[in-house]
Image (tube, rainbow, N blue to C red):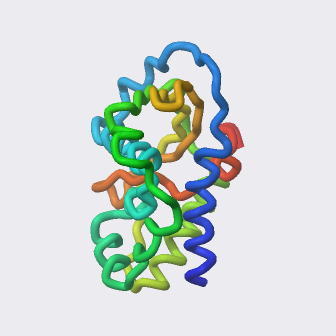
């Protein structure tokens, strides 16, 4: 079961890069300014971890602090960063990430069910209390990396767990689908 969960998380990470399509998107979504203030720093940390090939950082963004602590004690994050070679010093800098939300919407029930499955499996595996998604968004965004001189589009889901802590949902672009599902 643990290998499956790790595979799902790594698949999400890989799909982040593989599914990104580059182009010149339209301006930002005015509704993005109505998002809770905690979401943008969460997204920035997540995408910076992705740019820096910090897989442990990416995985940590999927879980609440109490869940992270239990997973850390169980060794869930060990060895993740050894799976990829990080960029050479100076190659990529966190300041190179330029992130813009271009669309917001509701997550589909299919996406919420997929996220619940991942969290339920982790709760069982690591003896964590079950968390409840109390709010969520499907976000379309654009990020620009000066090191690759490209602007790419991506979709991600964020959720408020137990009304207290925002997390990135560990779902692939296919699982996030359209907000109309």
Q: Quadrant of residue 117?
A: bottom right
4 or 32, which is in the foreground? 4
On the image, the x and y values in percent for residue 33 come to 36, 24
**Image quadrant occupied by the N terminus:** bottom right
> Seen in the image, is 154 located left or right of residue 128?
right
Q: Residue at 57% across / 63% down in the picture?
A: 10
Single out the residue that lies furthest toward the top.
27
73 or 87, which is in the foreground? 87
109 or 77, which is in the foreground? 77
On the image, the x and y values in percent for residue 56 come to 40, 64
Q: Residue at 41% across / 76% down in the picture?
A: 78
Q: Quadrant of residue 179?
A: top right
> As displayed, is residue 59 above or below residue 160?
below
61 or 95, which is in the foreground? 95
> As displayed, is residue 67 above or below residue 26?
below
> Seen in the image, is 181 located left or right of residue 147?
right
């Amino acid at each position: 079961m643990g290998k499956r969960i790790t595979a799902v998380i790594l698949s999400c990470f890989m799909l982040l890069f593989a599914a990104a399509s580059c182009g010149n998107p339209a301006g930002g979504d005015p509704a993005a300014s109505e998002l809770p203030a905690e979401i943008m720093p969460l997204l920035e940390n997540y995408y910076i971890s992705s740019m820096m090939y910090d897989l442990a950082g990416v995985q940590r963004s999927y879980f609440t602090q109490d869940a992270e602590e239990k997973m850390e004690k169980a060794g869930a994050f060990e060895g993740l960063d050894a799976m990829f070679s990080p960029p050479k010093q100076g190659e990529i800098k966190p300041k190179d990430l330029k992130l813009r939300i271009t669309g917001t919407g509701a997550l589909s029930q299919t996406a919420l069910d997929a996220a619940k499955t991942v969290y339920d499996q982790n709760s069982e595996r690591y003896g964590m209390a079950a968390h409840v998604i109390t709010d969520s968004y499907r976000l379309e965004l654009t990020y620009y990396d000066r090191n690759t001189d490209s602007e790419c589009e991506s979709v991600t889901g964020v959720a408020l767990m137990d009304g207290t802590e925002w997390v990135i949902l560990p779902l692939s672009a296919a699982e996030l689908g359209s907000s109309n599902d």
